[in-house]
Amino acid sequence: MDVRVPRLAEGVESATVANILVAPGDRIEKDQVILELETEKAVGPIPSPASGEVTKIHVKQGDEVAVGQVLMTLAEQGAVEKAAQDEKSKRRAVQRKTAQQGAPQQSEKLAAPEGLQPEPYRYESRSGFPPPASPSVRKIARELGIDLTRVKGSEAEGRITLGDIKAHIEQLQQIASAPGPAPEKAPKATPTSADFSRWGSIQKKRISTTRRTIGQRMYDSWSTIPHITQMDEADITELMELIKKHGPSYEKKGARLTFTPFALKAAVTALKKYPIFNSSLDEATEEIVYKQYYHLGVAVDTEAGLIVPVLRDVDKKSLSDLSAELNKLVERTRQRKVSLEELQGGTFTISNQGGIGGSHFTPIINKPEVAVLGLGRAALKPVVKNGKIEARLMLPLALSYDHRVIDGADAARFVRELTQALVSFKEADLKLIQR
Amino acid sequence: MEPLKTDIVVVGAGPGGYAAAFYAADKGKKVILVDREKRLGGVCLNCGCIPSKALLHATQLIREASESHERGISFVQPKISLGKLRSWKNSVVEKLSQGLSGLCQKRGVEFLQGRAHFQDSQTLRVETSEGQKFITYEKAIIAVGSKPAIPPAFDLGNKRVMTSTEALEIEEIPKNLLVVGGGYIGMELGTVYAMLGSSVVLTEALSSILVGVDTDLVRPVMRYAEKAFKAVRLNTKVVKMATSGKQIKVVLAADGKQKEEMYDRVLVSVGRVPNCKDLGLEDTKVTLDDKGFIQVNSQMQTSDPSIYALGDVVGGALLAHKASKEARVAVEAIIGESSAFENVIIPAVVFTDPEVAWCGLTEAEAKEKGIKVQVARFPWAASGRAMTLDRPDGLTKLIIEPESERVLGVGIVGTGAGELISEGVLAVEMGATARDIAESVHPHPTLSETLMECAEVFYGYPTHTVAQKKRTPLP
């Protein structure tokens, strides 16, 4: 049987594998916590839906996983064989519990520093009934592997609400991730709304889920990553002539030759030379993860807002294939037909505003990536070349990067490499892949 | 022949099977639904819940009309056309069954009529009218239900000895009917025949009708049965049955004495047995318990990892809505969602006159398990609505955990109890306290008020009755 990512919460479609607690060959019990998933909101333990032997683990720490994705494969035992074992495991669990009494539990023990342990809470009912909570709340708790007897209910007689579960998870997460004594958190200002109609007529529109998600991600990225933006200009006079020259023959094959695929190719050249730009920072383990694949996100302006679908293996694809694939992907994104998977796994992002206009801007990094390239509109500018002033087509480039892992000098080198790749794009590359 | 391939095959198209098939299809699975009958709906729709309720509703009017005399409105003796009654009942069944077929088609669930037989853990053979078909599947769900039990000694091969299936066909109104077994089926069908004019004798081997049901709730039903039936004989066993001309000779034993009686027809309602035989389960890893029910875990998975089972065939309460809930659990488990049949409140309704309904913990169960509870009772004699309906013979009771005041169980007897119990289910599932029910305004005059007033009884301030003892506030 395959163990899949359960439905995590309303609106949460994906999560990151925070910890894998079992290994292939392990015998596990039903409801045993097998791994922990981190969503935008919390870290939640994932219990095994069945007993059996772990035959394969399909994910690794740090992987982005989507709801329904296979996490691991179990060789199951039948129900009856299991019933006999359940009894045993129950006994074992009791022993474990007694041994752990007072000590924090599985997910809580990660890095729980002194003095930060939550008061051990356990719901007790004389009738032996589970704590009061609505069926929907119980269902979510089951999916997240939360033991409701450990959740303090805020309503009368300890009734547990969805909010209580959230608070419980936040508490677990805080304990798990706190590096030392908990920093004094400044109380978050409660959002207030102003009455703008006092100064004129207004119209109100509720923000969409997509908008809210974009907002959360942008805020998260902007507030947790020290951003620097390196700017430059690339002379693409010759490249544009190449595109003009070869455009018609591409057109005949049904592929419209646009600038973005060249930018993707140039980016890969630079990423290969400076792999740190194709990495991610694993904040939990304090590791830099270098990726040996080049999946590039392309920012697409849709009616619902910004969406960034990912083109896979850009390094392995020909220009014509890339062009065709990109056109289709952009089209499907505008129609909101891309799957969640197509939005995940990017290693670097390009945001091309050239089609709209404008010059340099400061793009925000698409976390957990570490850099993003923003392209403005190319314009004819006077450039001194060989002592003479020439009109050249100059493309504004802006590279934002995560200063925690990348230094300014590297950024300058990366941008130089990228510019160079665009300036001296070989016509041969264009022909070669014409087939 | 190339076998049919599917994600999920569901065997049995009753309320468990079709619920599973539809849900799985809604979740994007390719589903084949197999049933040996051409009509969808299983026992519940074709020869169980639905036809029996149709008959109970139709015949209920006979009682009401006769009682109406006391209220100043008199009717002449009703004329009964059995043919018309039967075809109306059948039309209800037919409409519902066609509705299911339509739902099946709309979802793209493929329906296959035929007998299903497991070849191994991954293959099902179906004997259809067009010959054998083989289905290979990822997962199978067995929901083949149960059938009326008939002890060999009663199985005379005489149509005058009926099970519920035949009784629902109302071939005739027997002058004298013996109902063997005082469970809900015997009580419901006995009521139908009594209304139609049969002289009904009901025997029960144990000391009470509706064994297992809260005694407070059984009492009004027993009182009514004693009036409507010629006799209700408890602690009475049927020793022997034999065909005797156009009648059945029955030997009954009670108090160590035997006596012989003649009946025109006999209804045997002594329980139901699972339909596990002839499924080829011996060629899978599926195991049965000592009563012949399929063993499953809380995900409805059998000992064979690729086979799930649900509904009557796995035992427990043999109820349609239990099967439907299990269907949700099974499908969710199959598609990898975490789901389990745990702490699920399954309400039960007996459509006797008056109806009995309950959910959650019962008073007897609490006693048996040593759970300390407080019971609040509200008699319907204090309900204005019950009086206007001329049915004050009801009772609403709440089983409450004293410390938390949480409602652990609800029991209701009275007309329309089956429609009232859902509020109880919601309360228990939500972990509501008696206060929650007392504070929720219930419309007047309705029978639902009895739930609110019952909660008020717990606190000592019901409006329409006087609580016996004031509840002392907890320190």
Image: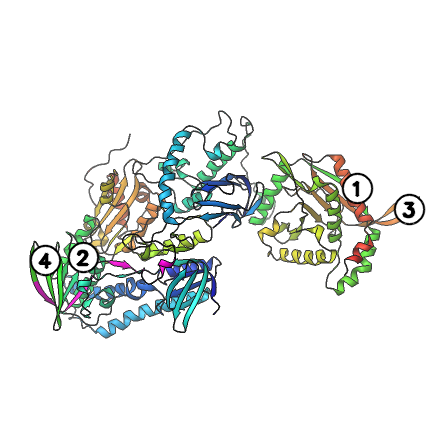
Which mark's residue is nearer the viewer, 1 or 3?
1
Q: Furthest residue to the front?
A: B283
What is the span of residues highlighted in magenta in the rendered image? B260-288
Between the C-alphas of marks 4 and 2, the distance is 16 Å
Between the C-alphas of marks 1 and 2, the distance is 91 Å
- Pinpoint the chain carrying mark 3: A
Q: Which residue is under mark 3? A: A389
Judging depth in this view, the residue of B259 and A181 nearest the camera is: B259
Between the C-alphas of marks 3 and 2, the distance is 107 Å
Where is residue A56 drawn, in percent x and y? Answer: 52, 46
In the picture, the disc for residue B253 is: 4
> Helix, strand or loop at disc 4?
strand
> Helix, strand or loop at disc 3?
strand
Between the C-alphas of marks 4 and 3, the distance is 121 Å
Q: Amino acid at mark 2?
A: Gly
Judging depth in this view, the residue of A375 and B362 nearest the camera is: B362
Q: Amino acid at mark 1?
A: Arg
Is residue B286 magenta-colored? yes
Labels 4 & 2 near each other (Cβ < 8 A): no
In the picture, the disc for residue B182 is: 2
Where is residue B253 drawn, in percent x and y? Answer: 10, 58
State left or right for residue A169 relative to residue A418: left
Labels 4 & 1 near each other (Cβ < 8 A): no
Q: Are marks 3 and 2 on the same chain?
A: no
Q: Amino acid at mark 4?
A: Ala
Judging depth in this view, the residue of A172 and B400 nearest the camera is: A172
- Pinpoint the chain carrying mark 4: B
Q: Which residue is under mark 1? A: A416
Q: How did the renderer colour the structure? A: rainbow
